[in-house]
Image: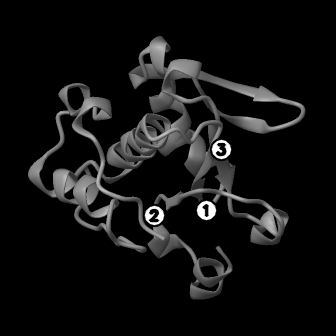
């Protein structure tokens, strides 16, 4: 189910500086169940996934829903490291949270309490069945074209 329209106060697009097509993705996530976002290499697809999930956490916090877990998936751990993890380290201001792993919750970007807590779980899809009973409020898949249709349907 898509989120309701966001309040402008929790949008940090001044930091994101989205391109027009990235802006359309950010707008669409509030009223669409699925969004497929493609384009040429270097178009900012991986970048906008990080920020879109962070924006959703801020939105949910603004309406009183805290400690949400979202998932950001890649087809393998090396791909996750190359396309997401190293950029979380570089891009995310510390006031939004921190990249870490815990025994209980695993590896991810842990959202700061001022943004509602919770986490963006960073996961690889080498064995999608690992997530059989996992629950995510939203899922973003980086390079969906690298996955089978069965994996998409599994998610």
Q: Earlier in the sequence, mark 3 or mark 2?
A: 3
Label 3 vs label 1, nearer the camera: 3
The residue tagged with tag 2: helix, strand or loop?
Answer: loop
**Which quadrant of the view contains residue 121?**
top right
Residue at the image position 27 percent from the left and 53 percent from the top: 26
102 or 115: nearer the viewer: 115
Q: Residues within 10 Å of mark 2 (few under 14, many from 20)?
A: some
Residue at 54%, 58% in the rendered image: 138
Label 3, secondary structure: give it: strand
Quarter containing the C terminus: bottom right
Which color mode does the image show?
one colour
SS assignment at label 1: loop
Mark 3 → mark 2, Cα distance in angstroms: 17 Å
Q: Kindly indicate whether the residue at mark 1 contacts the one at mark 2 (C-beta within 8 angstroms).
A: yes
Please state which of residues 28 and 42 is positioned toward the viewer in this rendering. Answer: 28
Gap between marks 3 and 1, in whole Å? 14 Å
Q: Nearer the viewer, mark 3 or mark 2?
A: 3
State the residue position of label 1. 75
Q: Residues within 10 Å of mark 1 (few under 14, many from 20)?
A: many
Residue drawn at the location 32% of the way across and 67% of the way down: 31
According to the picture, the residue beneath numbered tag 2 turns out to be 143
Question: Pointer 3: what residue?
Answer: 121
Choose the circle earlier in sequence order: 2 or 1.
1
How many residues crowd mark 3 within 10 Å: few (<14), some (14–19), many (20+)? many
């Amino acid at each position: 189910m898509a989120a309701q329209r966001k309040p402008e106060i929790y949008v940090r697009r001044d930091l994101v500086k989205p391109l027009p097509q990235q802006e359309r993705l950010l707008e669409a996530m509030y009223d669409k169940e699925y969004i497929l976002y493609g384009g040429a290499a270097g178009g900012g697809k991986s970048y906008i996934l990080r920020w879109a999930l962070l924006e959703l956490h801020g939105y949910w916090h603004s309406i009183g829903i805290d400690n949400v877990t979202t998932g950001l998936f890649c087809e393998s751990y090396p791909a996750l490291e190359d396309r997401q993890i190293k950029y979380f380290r570089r891009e995310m201001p510390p006031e939004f949270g921190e990249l870490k792993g815990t025994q209980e919750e695993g590896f991810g970007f842990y959202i700061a309490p001022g943004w509602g807590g919770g986490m963006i779980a960073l996961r690889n899809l080498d064995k999608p069945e690992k997530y059989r009973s996992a629950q995510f409020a939203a899922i973003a898949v980086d390079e969906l074209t690298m996955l089978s249709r069965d994996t998409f349907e599994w998610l």
